[in-house]
Amino acid sequence: MRIVVASGKGGTGKTTIATSLALVAAEHGSVHFLDCDVEAPNAGLFLHPQLTDTKDVGILIPQVNENRCTYCGECAKACQFHAIVTVGKKVLVFPELCHGCGSCALVCPEKAITEQLDVLGVLQGGRASSQIGFTQGVLNVGEPMAVPIIRELKQWELFSSASIEIRDAPPGASCPVVETLRGADYALLVTEPTPFGLHDLKQVVEVARELGIPSGVIINRDGIGNTDVELYCKEIGLPILMRIPMQREIAEGIASGKTLLDVSLDYHLSFKQLYEILLREGNL
Amino acid sequence: MKIAISINGSDLNALFDPRFGRAQAFCIVDSESADYQIFSNAAVAASGGAGVAAAQFVAEYRVDAVISGSYGPNAYETLSAANIKMYTLAGGGELNIQDVIEKFSAGELGEPQVPDHEGFHGRGRGFGGGRRRGSF
């Protein structure tokens, strides 16, 4: 069973929820935790994995053998991203525009294009406990394309035998979130009861629905803002699975690297109930 | 000499557009015969790589020079590879095509500084320009 913790708005508590859920799930079976927020992976701060394995990842970009190239321009015509271009008797490749689709190599009539790995980041993995295998992707600074890293992270087989997979998603509702959600059995959407929280929640709800993934909402910092998130959830039939109040002790706990389970014993029960709901909903 | 001027319109009354890759159109003028043609710039709506696409577009018309406001690193590299001379005109949004040609003839246009290619030497890529990668 694969659960994604997503949010739309950033800073609503995805990692807070995902890490506590992982610890409770680990009491019932083996867990694979994936930190898919490859631009700022920070779940490791709470789960303390021993990172023992690494793997360079990236995309395949074209390399042109100019001895074979006839400058016919077929590669440039095929490229939707203007990452390869022929001008006169020259062919230019712009790796930063390339999406690694391989079309140029496919259409080249002279077989002058080979593909080479352009490293965009790294996968890291190791055990956080006997029951929790932890992996994360780390996008290199300055590289804006997170999707190839997330895709490779999902395919990395380090802990693929675990019975439950928990993916901590990046914020937003764009391609990296779509890639994180793809193939999931359930989407836990963490929001806060504010206009920003609602606005971005709606976007990620649309994404999950488009992908056909059942979803439920967790309201974090409950008590601030207004009731619009609740009204919206009621209106579209989205279950509210958990509420976490706005409390100073939670903020202090998170800031010192504690999970919610460490902050208060009560959360152990809440997360156990949440886990049971997820088992039920996700297996439908 | 054939010169492509980035313009913000589709006829001879169009004003100069200081953007190169995202210009609405290019006016290609022959400075000797004063013949001109206007071509809309397909790259204006490209999700990424507009500078490269626009540079390839004007290169296909075998222009000798381009006049625009500024050039991104990818456009600069592509135009350089095509041996197309780049001229810059600061501001200029109020000028029409005739005004731009007069400034060109009077030698009042600038030339671009070599853009900062931080990835050009950094990773041994062989080809390639800057490090900004378009998002999916």
Image (tube, helix red, strand yellow):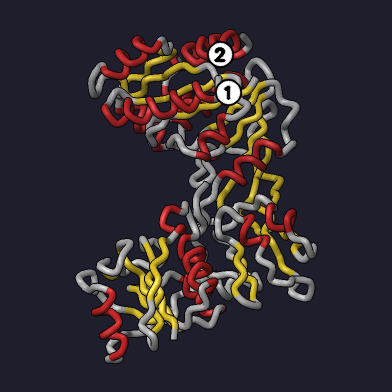
Query: Which quadrant, please, contains the N terminus of chain A?
Result: top right
**Tag 1 or tag 2, which sits nearer the N-term?**
1
| Quarter occupied by residue A184 | top right
| Quarter occupied by residue B91 | bottom left
- What residue would you read off at disc 1? A3
Q: Amino acid at mark 1?
A: Ile
Residue at (67% x, 42% y) in the render: A152
Between A278 and A71, which is closer to the camera in this rendering? A71
Q: What chain letter is assigned to the residue under label 1?
A: A
Q: Are marks 2 and 1 in contact (CB under 8 Å)?
A: yes
Q: What chain letter is assigned to the residue under label 2?
A: A
Q: Secondary structure at mark 1?
A: strand
Q: Amino acid at mark 2?
A: Leu
Residue at (61% x, 56% y) in the render: A79
Question: Whole-percent x and y of residue A20?
Answer: 51, 24
Can residue A180 be spotted in the picture? yes
Between B46 and B1, which is closer to the camera in this rendering? B1
- What residue would you read off at disc 2? A278
* Residue A66 appears left or right of A11: right
